[in-house]
């Protein structure tokens, strides 16, 4: 606010730089230009300069990235955009070099030219700013829909996804290749409904290829942001919390659908990476690990052949075992990337699991002595909601106590550090201090995670908190005219336009999460308003689902839920018996399962779904239903699993 007031008072244009901590070229431009005394003096003479973390202010990033893309035809970070004092953009780009280079204007020349235009051609600048503001407002507007998504549209979406499938290397499209966890989960749902083997093959080949590739940290677990090549070998080495949370959940779904133990193990190692390297002292998860260490991209993760062999030799492996592991992980003397080796699971080679574990442990210990990549320790509400969803899912699917405890710890962090006034959220916390009002994606992603925590733990509070957060989101972010959520509320600064997340990018949009969460809450509470709001979102995006399916992975799953007939399991009672029943309920792959628990003293015991469902004979009791058809109450986890399987066929 102080900087904006200065710009208005002095009628000075604003230079806005938007980036993020793990962005390589953001650091380069900062070092080359912002820290250069002559360039800094030029900036301070002509502009009010503001630097923004896109992860803390996604609203500003969305609006001004749309502006840069409209002006230049492309976008990226660092984003460099020039604004009038009333925040209308009139010129922009991405990275500018410190001097003219390769046909690109140097940043000092850009600053001088923009300052001259603002001072001497003001009417032209105002015209450009006005036209661009009108374009952005029109681009971000949405018309309400009047037709529900149809099964035909989802079938067309599957066909278009399949047309871009890389049958050789897995994934979709060519390089660079990004992990597609939301698309994979939609395809799994489709396979469960249709039984189409080709659809399942797209999922398993992609899960296998990513797990084998260099994008997957073969030593420490977790996944990098994306692969620079088509076969998943060479990653851009930064590790993001949201990627790993979404991928862990996708591998858990792959494990449920196929019972392939490897998918369960990849989910474990990914969640364990999150707990060991991203979890903060406060209990939440940090945002990212940088790609660089010691100023070199990937240095922390790569190995020379000689160093690899030396580490294994020092750990007591003989030369034959070491050579076997070198072949298993695709190492060569000349290297597979910049004269070093990125570990990946090489085709045609194999090694016993005990030997692989010995090698991995030795490499992990040796790597711990290296200079670590920088940690971006801010804890973002939406991303921690995604982590809670994955951790809670693992607690039931894998039946391992450490994920139950991790779910409790993360839930407590969110409740104590990010929730305010019982039903509102902060966007960001760091070092025990929170700031920036939450955005729609924060409310809905945390509600999503809390519903997962309720399913895993059986406690009432996460369910009730999820409902309070959704009610706040509907009050503060809902656009009744368009029938969708806006990203911002009245708590946020007003810019040239209010962004509205509909498209699933690296993370699911607020509306995609909302369409899914609202449907589940409608079933849990019996409140029809939630169902109508979900239907409204799906109607608004229905025409786009078949045209651009890769941009709507989570939304397609929400549409599939809308067209389906969900199964609900209510576990009445508490204690170890109730835990076993909850774990049994999720063993069959039922993507539309709504799992909930209730005790007589819970305030939600009077909700229609829970009413009258009590523990019988002093033992935890499960009630499995689909629509208006229910099986007999049972205490037996094996019988409960069988009931869920039978209900799938109805």
Image: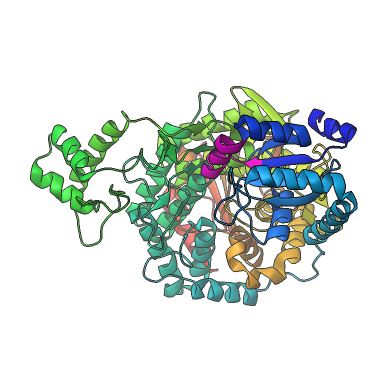
Whether 492 is drawn above or below 595: the answer is above
Residue at 81% across, 28% down: 2
Quadrant where the C terminus lies? bottom right
Residue at 9% across, 47% down: 320
Say if residue 394 shows up in the picture.
yes
Q: How many marks?
A: 0
Q: Return the x and y of residue 338 as percentages of the image width and height.
A: 32, 50
Question: Range of the magenta residues?
Answer: 18-33
Name which quarter of the figure residue 362 lies in.
Answer: top left
Q: Nearer the viewer, residue 436 or 204?
A: 436
Q: Nearer the viewer, residue 525 or 521?
A: 521
Coloring scheme of the render?
rainbow
Q: Is residue 130 toward the left or the right of residue 572 in the image?
A: right
Name which quarter of the figure residue 565 lies in.
Answer: bottom right
Say if residue 600 shows up in the picture.
no
Quadrant where the N terminus lies? top right
Q: Is residue 623 toward the left or the right of residue 112 in the image?
A: left
Type of secondary structure dominating the magenta stretch = helix
Q: Return the x and y of residue 46 as percentages of the image width and height.
A: 78, 36
Q: Is residue 77 toward the left or the right of residue 342 in the image?
A: right
Residue at 31% across, 49% down: 342
Q: Is residue 21 magenta?
A: yes
Q: Is residue 532 toward the left or the right of residue 574 in the image?
A: right
Q: Return the x and y of residue 220 as percentages of the image width and height.
A: 35, 40
Q: Is residue 225 magenta?
A: no
Q: Nearer the viewer, residue 403 or 186?
A: 186
């Amino acid at each position: 606010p102080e900087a904006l007031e200065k710009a208005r008072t002095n009628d000075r244009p604003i230079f806005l730089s938007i980036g993020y901590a793990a962005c390589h070229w953001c650091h380069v431009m900062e070092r080359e230009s912002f820290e250069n005394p002559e360039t800094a003096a030029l900036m301070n003479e002509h502009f009010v300069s503001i630097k923004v973390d896109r992860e803390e202010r996604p609203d500003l990033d969305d609006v001004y990235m749309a502006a840069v893309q409209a002006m230049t035809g492309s976008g990226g970070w660092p984003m460099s955009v020039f604004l009038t004092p009333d925040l209308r953009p009139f010129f922009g780009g991405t990275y500018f070099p410190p001097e003219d280079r390769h046909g690109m204007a140097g940043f000092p020349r850009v600053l001088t030219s923009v300052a001259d235009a603002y001072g001497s051609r003001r009417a032209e600048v105002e015209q450009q700013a006005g036209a661009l503001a009108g374009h952005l407002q029109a681009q971000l507007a949405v018309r309400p829909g009047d037709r529900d998504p149809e099964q035909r549209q989802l079938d067309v979406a599957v066909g278009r996804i399949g047309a871009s499938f890389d049958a050789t290397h897995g994934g979709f499209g060519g390089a660079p290749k990004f992990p597609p966890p939301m698309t994979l989960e939609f395809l799994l749902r489709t396979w469960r409904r249709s039984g189409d083997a080709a659809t399942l093959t797209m999922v398993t080949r992609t899960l296998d290829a990513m797990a084998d590739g260099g994008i997957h940290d073969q030593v420490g677990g977790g996944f990098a942001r994306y692969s620079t090549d088509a076969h998943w070998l060479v990653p851009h080495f930064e590790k993001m919390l949201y990627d790993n949370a979404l991928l862990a959940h996708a591998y858990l779904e792959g494990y449920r659908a196929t019972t392939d133990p490897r998918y369960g193990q990849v989910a474990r190692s990914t969640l364990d990476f999150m707990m060991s390297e991203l979890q903060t002292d406060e209990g939440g998860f940090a945002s990212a690990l940088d790609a660089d260490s010691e100023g070199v991209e990937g240095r922390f993760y790569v190995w020379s052949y000689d160093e690899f062999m030396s580490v294994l030799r020092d750990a007591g492996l003989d030369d034959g075992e070491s050579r076997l592991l070198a072949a298993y992980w695709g190492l060569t003397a000349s290297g597979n990337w910049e004269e070093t080796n990125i570990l990946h699971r090489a085709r045609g080679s194999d090694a016993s699991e005990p030997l692989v574990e010995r090698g991995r442990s030795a490499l992990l210990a040796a790597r711990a002595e290296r200079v670590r990549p920088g940690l971006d320790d801010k804890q973002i509400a939406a991303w921690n909601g995604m982590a809670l969803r994955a951790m809670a899912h693992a607690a039931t699917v894998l039946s391992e106590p450490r994920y139950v405890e991790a779910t409790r710890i993360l839930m407590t962090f969110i409740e104590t550090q990010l929730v305010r006034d019982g039903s509102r959220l902060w966007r960001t916390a760091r070092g025990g201090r929170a700031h920036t009002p939450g955005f729609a994606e924060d409310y809905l992603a945390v509600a999503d995670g809390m519903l997962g925590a309720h399913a895993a733990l059986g406690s009432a509070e996460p369910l009730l908190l999820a409902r309070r957060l959704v009610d706040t989101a509907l009050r503060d972010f809902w656009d009744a005219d368009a029938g969708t959520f806006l990203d911002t509320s009245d708590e946020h600064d007003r810019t040239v336009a209010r962004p509205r997340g509909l498209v699933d990018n690296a993370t699911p949009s607020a509306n995609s999460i909302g369409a899914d969460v609202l449907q589940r809450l409608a079933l849990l509470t019996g409140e029809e308003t939630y169902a109508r709001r979900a239907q409204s979102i799906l109607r608004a995006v229905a025409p786009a689902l078949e045209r651009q399916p890769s941009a709507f992975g989570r939304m397609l799953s929400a549409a599939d839920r809308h067209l389906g007939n969900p199964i609900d399991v209510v576990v009445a009672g508490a204690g170890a018996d109730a835990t076993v029943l909850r774990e049994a309920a999720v063993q069959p792959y039922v993507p539309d399962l709504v799992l909930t628990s209730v005790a007589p003293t819970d305030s939600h015991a009077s909700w229609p779904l829970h009413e009258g469902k009590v523990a019988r004979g002093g033992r935890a009791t499960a009630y499995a239903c689909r629509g208006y058809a229910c099986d007999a109450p049972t205490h037996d986890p094996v019988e409960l699993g069988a009931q869920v399987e039978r209900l799938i066929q109805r």
